[in-house]
Structures are given as structure tokens and as C-alpha cells.
Image (cartoon, helix red, strand yellow):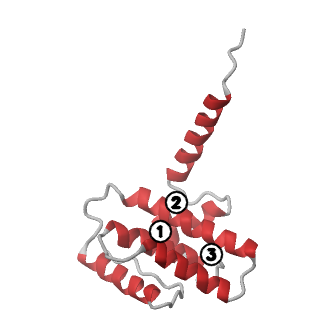
Amino acid sequence: MEATRSPRAAYAAFAAAMFAAALSACGTVDSIRGKVATDPEMAARNVDREDPLARPTQVGWTSARASYCGFIFDPAQLKANYLASEAQAGKTPQEMAKLEHAYDYTRDSVTATIKTNLTYCSKERTNAIRRDLNRYLSGDFTPSARMGQ
């Protein structure tokens, strides 16, 4: 006789699989589109500037990095300001949903990727993060984020 799973066990298995998939080494933009890539941090940095997901990917990436490296800013306000700029540019509700998903996915996956790297916040990297964060905080969400070393 085959054992049956309870709905709770099935949900837990599904949630664990989704969590593992989100934390795997998938590229940010490609993962959002259902394609397998490599490192989410490299994908965020190297996203094509003409890609419609370049802005949310790089702003989310910078937010994750700045939070990890101890920058004093309000990540929720940065996200709200970014999304407001996209809405003001005339994005449809469907486009806004995709942009918010890309932002959240990037922020979460990059945070998970770098959280155990004790040497992540090098001087060069924090300088690059500072430049990008200051630009975003001033309302310029042009995709051109820098990695730093």
C-alpha cells in the first residue's frame, strides 16, 4: 500500500524545492525568464543596458550589496522610489509586476549569494556600491552599476 502525503507535507516539499531553486547559482535575469545561467551577481552586473529588466536588476543588486556592506539607507524607500519612477514613465500594471518581481528576485538571490562572504566589502567594491547607490538615491536609475573588486 502506497503512503499518501498530507497536503501540508506536499506544500512543505514544494516550498523547499522553490527555496532551493531560488538559492541555486542561477543568473538573475535569465532565472526570471526561466533560463539557467550562472552567478546572480555577475548576471546583474552584466545585464544588457537595453534589456527591459536591466534597471530593476541593477537597482535590486545594488540595494542587496549596500545593505550587506552596512550602508545607511532605507531599502524599502529605494524600491518604492524606483517603482514610482517606472510607473511615472507609463509602465502598465503587468510591466510593473515584472519589474517588481525582477527587483525582489535580484535582491533576495544576491543577498543569499554574498551573505557568507566575509571579504565581500572591499574598499574598491564599497566605492562602486556608494557611487551606484548615491545615483539611485538621487533618482537616476540608469543601468550602469559597477562591480568593484
The kind of residue tagged 2 is Thr
- Tell me what residue is drawn at x 43 percent, y 89 percent: 135
Q: Are marks 2 and 1 in contact (CB under 8 Å)?
A: yes
Q: Position of residue 62 (x, y in %)?
A: 43, 75
Q: Secondary structure at mark 2?
A: loop
How far apart, in angstroms, are the residues tagged by discs 2 and 3?
17 Å
- Tell me what residue is drawn at x 30 percent, y 66 percent: 120
Q: Secondary structure at mark 1?
A: helix
Q: Earlier in the sequence, mark 2 or mark 3?
A: 2
Residue at the spot of label 3: 53
Tag shown at residue 74:
none
The kind of residue tagged 1 is Met
Residue at the spot of label 2: 38
Q: Residues within 10 Å of mark 2 (few under 14, many from 20)?
A: some
Q: Is residue 74 left or right of residue 122?
A: right
Q: Secondary structure at mark 3?
A: loop
Quarter of the picture containing the C terminus is: bottom left
Q: Residues within 10 Å of mark 3 (few under 14, many from 20)?
A: many
Q: Note whether 18 is above or below 38 in the view shown.
A: above
Q: Position of residue 44 (x, y in %)?
A: 51, 71
Nearest to viewer (mark 2 / mark 3) = 3
Residue at the spot of label 1: 42
The kind of residue tagged 3 is Leu
In the picture, residue 1 is in which quadrant?
A: top right
Q: Position of residue 105 (x, y in %)?
A: 55, 62
Q: Is residue 103 left or right of residue 124?
A: right
